[in-house]
Amino acid sequence: MVNLIWLLMLLVGIVVAALNGHIEIVTDASLEAAQTAVNLAFELIGLMAMWLGLLKIAEEAGLVAFLARLLRPCTRYLFPEIPRDHPAIGSIIMNMSANILGLGNAATPFGLKAMQELQTLNPRPEEATPAMCTFLGLNTGCITLIPATIIGIRAAAGSTDPTIVVGPTILATGFSMVMAVVFDRVFRRFYGDHRR
Amino acid sequence: MTEAVVAVSRWAIPLVLFLIPAYGYLRGVAVYEAFVAGAEDGFKVAIKIIPFLVGMLVAISVFRASGAMDLFARSLNPVLHLVGIPGEVLPLAVMRPLSGGGALGVAAELIGDYGPDSFIGRLASVMQGTTDTTFYVLTVYFGSVGVRRYRYALALGLIADISSLIAAVAICRLMFG
């Protein structure tokens, strides 16, 4: 699926550029994107280091374990196959918290950390586990309380009420989170996943 | 309302930076050493995702810059019109799962062109805040641990995206229509 989408985006893009008579766009766009990707990764080194450093302090102080205990009913339901007190739970909770607060630059480090923890529980390392699918579904559909970036853009554009979109954002993301949880259950049943 | 939200987003990171180390210190954690030990992991992960970032961004960028993405959005127009999604925000809807930065650019353009307090401006704002860069998140997250078979993760992510898109349009029509 991903192979096909990737191939189609690339080939269709090149064909369209050729038909439009702007084939040089392909050269510029691809070379620039390759550099952007590396710049992104380099920015991420600093962000990852900072947030994972804080995460380590929070872990050693027992803060993550406390949050994990608090949210155990939720996580037991959503991730039945993750053992109690596994570090994956802590990282997942931190990632979700960052998403909910609209802290995008903190969400990625915690999310990548969570994936590493989940991978330690994976019996077939090349294949996604149900817990990974649930995590990514929740990640995509996560409820957002503070869409900080867009509020900034609205304010900069001279809006009389930049935060009027907060209510609708909370409602719409809440709905998509419910849908993600429901369809995750459906897919789990469909794929017959109850392995631990 | 505006002041409160702005204050929360301004204070969120400083507060986290204050509270976690302060609490750790009170609990007897060697805070600086713990921070450095945790930070070490960041480097390896960030390097490991470079191939996936390059692969995805190159394909997305060619698709977008060539105008193919606009064509794709326009070809979806009749379908999306049926569910009441205005044509103006279509490029944003198509862009959003692929590229966060690209979508932000499109949203900013719509807000600038139609005005932040217009229906389209508000809808674009809500759409930007609700959906996620599913494609990017999936390829980078799975790539970082070497998972090749995503199983139903992509379908689940796209369902979440489409749900929030439809919800965003419905709620905006009700509130701002």
Image (cartoon, coloured by chain):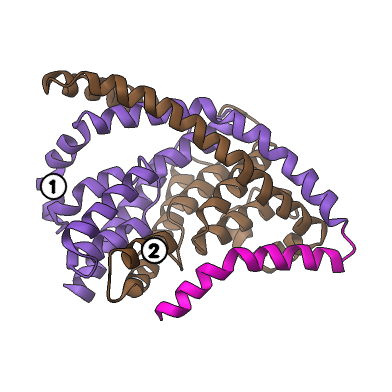
Could you say which disc has been placed on residue A152 in the image?
2
Q: Which residue is mark 1?
A: B79
- Indicate the chain coloured purple by its letter: B
Residue B149: x and y, percent? 49, 29
**Residue B23, image x, y percentages:** 79, 68
The nearer-to-camera label among 1 and 2 is: 2
Question: Magenta: predominant secondary structure element?
Answer: helix
Quarter of the N terminus of chain B within the rendering: bottom left
Dot 1: element: helix
Q: Secondary structure at mark 2?
A: helix
Q: Quadrant of the C terminus of chain B?
A: bottom left
Which residue occupies 72% across, 55% down?
Answer: A54
The kind of residue on which mark 2 rests is Gly
Left or right for B68, reference A4: left
Q: Label 2: few (<14), some or many (≥20) within 10 Å?
A: some
The front one of A79 and A37 is A37
What whole-number distance in Å separates the C-alpha atoms at marks 1 and 2?
Answer: 32 Å
Give the percent coordinates (x, y) of residue A148: 44, 63
Span colored in magenta: B1-29
Locate residue B63 relative to residue A105 in the image: left or right: left
Q: Chain of mark 1?
A: B
Which mark is drawn over residue B175? Answer: none
Q: Colour of chain A?
A: brown
A35 is higher (above) or lower (below) than A167: above
Three-letter amino acid code at disc 1? Val
